Image (tube, rainbow, N blue to C red):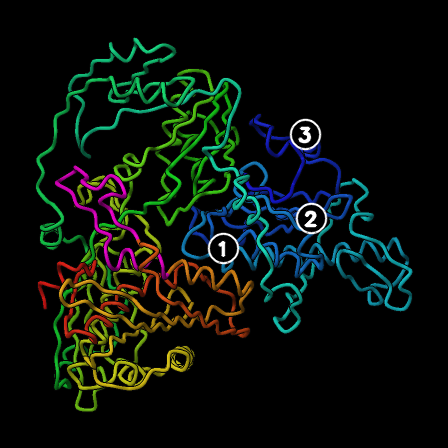
Amino acid sequence: MTTGDITNPAFEEDSSVGALGRRDFIRLLGPGLYLFFSIEEAFPFDQEGGGGRGYPADFNAYLRIAEDGRVTCFTGKIEMGQGIIAALAQMLAEELEVSYNSVSVVLGDTRLCPWDGGTNGSRSVKYFGPALRAAGAEAREVLIQMAAEQLQVPRDRLTVKDGVVSDRTNAAKKISYGALAKGKTIERHLEQKPALKAPAAFTVCGKSLPRVDAPEKVTGKAKYAGDIRLPGMLYGRVLKPPAHGAKLKKVDVSAAKAIDGARILQEGDFVAVVHPLPDGAEKALSLIKAEYDLPEAKVDEKTIHEHLLNIPPRETVVENRGDLSKGRELSVLKFEESYYTPYVAHAPMETHTAVAQVEGDSATLWIGTQRPFGAQDEIAKLLGLSPSKVRVITPYVGGGYGGKSQIGQAVQAARLSKMTGSPVQVFYTREEEFFYDTFMPAAIVKISSGLNASNQIVFWDYRVLFAGERSSQNYYDVPHVRTASSGGFSGGSGSPHPFGTGAWRGPGSNTNIFARESHMDVMAARAGMDPMEFRLKNLVDKRMIRVITAAGEKFGWKPAKAPSGRGFGMVCFDYLGTYVAAMAEVKVDKSSGKIQVVRVVHAQDMGPVINPEGARMQIEGGITMGLGYCLSEEIHFNGGEIKNLNFDDYVITHFSWVPSIEAVLIDNPDMPPSGGGEPPIVGMGALIANALFDATRVRLNRLPLTPERIKAKL
């Protein structure tokens, strides 16, 4: 569990599970002001799509104020490098009127934190932030009411700064939040909820304040799931099949049993070993001999798109306006193109890891997960327990990217802990991480479009298969539009994929933006127009025009018909309310086909910016990661057999690939805050594909843009 600088050992050491009474809860947290809540009391609407549950309307769920004035912020979100440990602390400090340094954050503990649907989609600031700010604002007003009563001063004469309430006319008359608490619980609410601060009044938000997790991470003190140690803990390893869909035929565990300290556990096809040492578990597992019935391998990375096209699922119409047939009649130039994306791995540095301690009718788990509450429900169902009897604690997570929404390692650890009666840690090897991954799905987009004599887009017929509809919506000024989606990004039982697929940073958006923004350049080139001028001609959205203009000014974009030979490319898009325009310069070695990205300018309007330096870091990280799926990342497979099982043949971004990155943050206080982590990555495919075309006349409609594919086109 991430605790900032919380020193109460109960946060780390208490492993009991079960419903806490009020006195038990107070004893666990220590002295202070407790604002009690009901987790199930929800907003009128469910912001996270979590089966009817949403964020608590009661402000008491989100914070605790101790006698010394320190504030603890509770959130069901988790920290996996994106920096919400700073941004959320800033948002609470802003509304509560306390110093940023006085706020500690507890993330992803299902016993202590309000329910949350998961950390995904760049939605922590966007969805949880307003709820947290509202909680801080109401708590502030309750405390000021209490101060008015204690100081015997009218409310309108009181002001608060850094957690101290004082009389405007007599500065000596004051009282701190900590003194107001006196170790007692307070249950008080406001009938009239206070308004949130206007961005112009911010004193904490909008500043590049340091992250409290930075010292822990650079010194190695930060705790991840793999760092958890419990008395009597065993290390578990589970037999992995050679391919997805393989069925265990025969198993011989006799040699593994000979390893001193090893225990062999089996339930049907589930075969595992536990040992007091990780090396002992690994050695015992290596001695197990197993035979499998393998499914017929019908597809590989070369044939998967044809396979998917032959079995499209039911179509959902995303948007439909105007009349496509009329748009076709108006067109003097028509375009038909298809775009393809492959399976891509999450490849986090921290592999999936969990520790489970199952004791009687309760369980505690430390999991590297993006969904603590989803994991709680899943483990409870597995063990036949009520969710209230299962506590999930989320330490720091070493990269998730959507892949750590899955908790296969925690399921294995929970099963082994129940079978052995001991706490068990399961950590995936790098090979297991690749094998059990739920990849970004292979997908196809088919686009038919047309321009009139003025080079305005008059019809747009868009169909996406197996990526989902996110970012498929058309934001250009087109009168006749139809957008349809067949199949989502998650592929479970019965899907046409040979293995599991799921969310991968901006699920669906990577594919949809690659297709649409590549197609925009295809049309611009044939129309003989500069790519930026072509987009501006077909836009009426002033916010988007502003973002493009800002990017162009920073980049120094000079209009020219593509391909100009300069190696310039651009994209613009709306990612869940965050507006982006990005421009890049590339150089291409025509003898090898290798692309070197020289420079990227990324302009982003995400509403008010909570932590500018944090936003810039997210932009730089997203662009760096995006180069991998753009230039090299692709899973090779034969049916259910995964060929890429380590970084020797699955190539992610190298340091030498990283270009000069310039982030342009467009502060837009008139908009609500939006996400900043995923928008930088989702445009990279089209951005570099467009720059490649401008440099070489080579148009690749399939990712990744490998040297082999470029050379073949050249």
Query: Regarding mark 2 in the picture, which secondary structure is present there?
Result: strand
Please name the residue that numbered disc 3 is placed on: 24
Q: Amino acid at mark 2?
A: Val
Q: Residue reaching furthest bottom?
A: 454
Question: Residue at horizontal 34%, vertical 70%?
Answer: 599
CA gap, disc 2 and disc 3: 20 Å
Q: Is residue 569 left or right of residue 227?
A: left
Label 3: how many residues lie within 10 Å, few (<14), some (14-19) or many (20+)? Answer: few
Q: Which mark is residue 124?
A: 1
Label 1: how many residues lie within 10 Å, few (<14), some (14-19) or many (20+)? Answer: many
**Is residue 604 depicted above or below 344 in this figure?**
below
Q: Earlier in the sequence, mark 3 or mark 1?
A: 3
Question: Residue at horizontal 63%, vertical 56%?
Answer: 92
Please name the residue that numbered disc 2 is placed on: 71
**Is residue 698 depicted above or below 545 in this figure?**
above
Q: Nearer the viewer, residue 173 or 9?
A: 9
Question: Residue at horizontal 40%, vertical 22%?
Answer: 235
Q: Is residue 147 left or right of residue 700?
A: right
Determine whether label 2 and label 3 are within 8 Å by CB: no
- Say whether residue 635 is magenta: yes
Q: Amino acid at mark 1?
A: Ser
Q: Earlier in the sequence, mark 2 or mark 3?
A: 3
Question: Residue at horizontal 39%, vertical 70%?
Answer: 602
Q: Residue 475: where, in percent of width, then height? A: 32, 74
Q: Nearer the viewer, residue 365 or 479?
A: 365
Q: Residue 644: where, in percent of width, then height? A: 21, 42
Q: Earlier in the sequence, mark 2 or mark 1?
A: 2
Q: Which mark is residue 377?
A: none
Q: Amino acid at mark 3?
A: Asp
Q: Residue 398: where, in percent of width, then height? A: 43, 44
Magenta stretch in the rendered image: 623-652
